[in-house]
Image (spheres, rainbow, N blue to C red):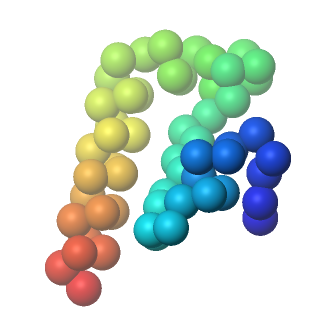
Amino acid sequence: DTRDDLGGLNLSTVPKVFVECGNMRDPKDAALLTAASWRQKAAQGLADGIAGHLKG
C-alpha cells in the first residue's frame, strides 16, 4: 500500500522496509513502547529477522 505521508519511502528507488512496532495513541502500545525492555526485545526481533533473511 502507498501512503501519502511517506514520500521518502514512496519515492525511493531501492528496496525499503517500514517498521511500525506500535501506535502511541493506543494506551497498551504506548506502555510497551516506553519500556526499555520491550524496545530491546523488539530491536532484537528485527535484527534476528533481518539476519535470517540475509542468510537465506
For image coordinates 33% across by 23% down, the residue present is 37
Report whether 1 appears left or right of 14.
right
Inspect this view and state whether residue 28 appears: no
Residue 40 placed where, x, y %?
Answer: 30, 31
Using the image as rendered, state which of residue 11 and residue 4 is in the foreground.
Answer: 11
Q: Quick check: 21 left or right of 2? A: left
In the image, taking residue 45 as reference, residue 2 lies left or right, namely right
Q: Would you say 10 lies left or right of 25 here?
A: left
Q: Quadrant of the N terminus?
A: bottom right
Q: Tell me: residue 30, above or below residue 44.
A: above
Question: Which picture quadrant has residue 54?
Answer: bottom left
Specify whether residue 37 is in view.
yes
Q: Is residue 53 above or below residue 12?
A: below
Q: Quadrant of residue 20?
A: top right
Q: Residue at x 30, y 63 (%)?
A: 50
Tell which of 52 and 38 is nearer to you. Answer: 52
Which quadrant would the C terminus be assigned to in this image? bottom left
